Image (cartoon, helix red, strand yellow):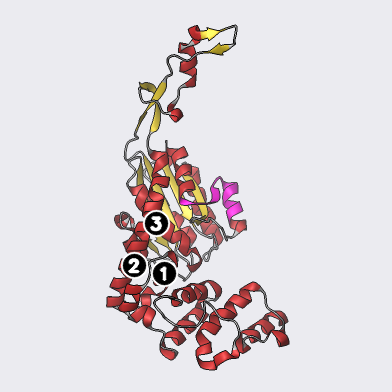
Amino acid sequence: MNEQQRMLRWRLVLGGADDLLGAPGAEWQERDAALAFLYDREYGAGRNVRMGGPGSLDPSQLAVPDWINAVHELFPRRTIERLEKDALERYQLEEMVTNPDLLSRAQPSPVLLKAVLRTKHLMNQEVLAMARNLVRKVVQDLIERLAREIRSPFTGTVDRRRRSLLRVAKNFDARTTIRRNLANYDPASRRMYIRQPVFFSRVRRQSDRWQLIILVDESGSMLDSVIHAAITAAIFWGIKSLRTHLVLFDTSIVDVTDQCTDPVETLMKVQLGGGTDIGQAVSYAASLVDNPRRTIVVLISDFYEGAPIQRLYSAAKGLLDSGVTLLGLAALDQDARPTYDRQVAAHLVSMGAHVAAMTPGELADWVAQKVL
């Protein structure tokens, strides 16, 4: 630890000591605010940075979920465990995980959803049941917003052997239309008058023609992607041109394909944090493949591998050599702002994989281009 880091840590201990130790950067100010939210209860006004106003649990300002999310984004796992322990045992901030009345008054939101997923291991059964209902409300709202965007590219593929009376612009057969209307060409004006436009028909693919295997890294930094992956997989499940699998992983693997239609159950199984063994997950995906050239594996991860990196490269090479299409996603949410190991991602690309950051709608477009 260098001298600057040591000084910044002392600043967190002292709180608000800008004059003595210098103003910290934005991330350190956020850390200070998160600590102030909790420990000002004991030390009073010693800390001058607050987060979301006073640390109350008023129904009109539910600040605890914001604090929970900030803590999980700003501190390492050991520190998170200590902060949660102090919040529950030392300062009695147990309402979030013990009081069903508080949850019943809470407004469902993505912020609250993430806070629930991060603290569900602390909840008793009564509160867990209430939290599950909150999760369901938020998930249903996300499904309603994303379903059309994801399903739209799969409405049907062009059948160039059949014609249709349905005049839809994207089905317009320009070449055949020109050929059939050549007699309507006017040399004087150099214009062709279309009297008989021709359109393609569209047909749906066989339900088992393509296999889509979605691997989701459930490390803490990937929470937004985990939420959107569960919802996206549930929507993909209803698309007849795809046979979808959903697999969660850290250092172990949980295949939740049998619950793919219920993203709430999938999310309630998520265990955030811990190590990451991406290579093991990719090897598991290989065991699910039926027809490599009709299979897409979507690996949603930040690519920070905890296991030996060569095992990941070897597993990925085996998939690619067999003919599987491998897409690595550094982010899957509405913002698609990636944070990932660029060196590992670049190596996967050099092997033939595709790597990107996408929204759920962009992922659907990408998959549709491969499948249809």
Which quarter of the rendering shows the N terminus? bottom right
Q: Is residue 237 magenta?
A: no
Distance of label 3 from label 2 (alpha carbons): 13 Å
In what element is the residue under mark 3?
Answer: helix
Neighbor class of circle 2 (other Cα within 10 Å; few <14, some 14-19, many 20+) is: many
Asked whether 76 or 186 is in front, the reply is: 186
Between discs 2 and 1, the one toward the N terminus: 1
Q: Tell me, for residue 161, which label it has, or none.
A: none
Asked whether the residues under the numbered discs 2 and 1 touch, taking CB atoms below 8 Å apart as contact, a structural biologist would say yes
Q: Position of residue 275 (x, y in %)?
A: 48, 69
Q: Is residue 106 above or below residue 21?
A: above
Distance of label 2 from label 1 (alpha carbons): 8 Å
Amino acid type of the residue that numbered disc 1 sits on in the rendered structure? Leu
| Residue 244 visible in the picture | no
Q: Tell me, for residue 112, which label it has, or none.
A: 1
Image-quadrant location for residue 227 = bottom left
Which residue lies under the disc numbered 2? 134
Residue drawn at 54 percent across, 79 percent down: 34
> Which stretch is magenta?
345-360
Residue drawn at 51 percent across, 66 percent down: 221
Residue drawn at 48 percent across, 72 percent down: 69
Asked whether 199 or 285 is in front, the reply is: 199
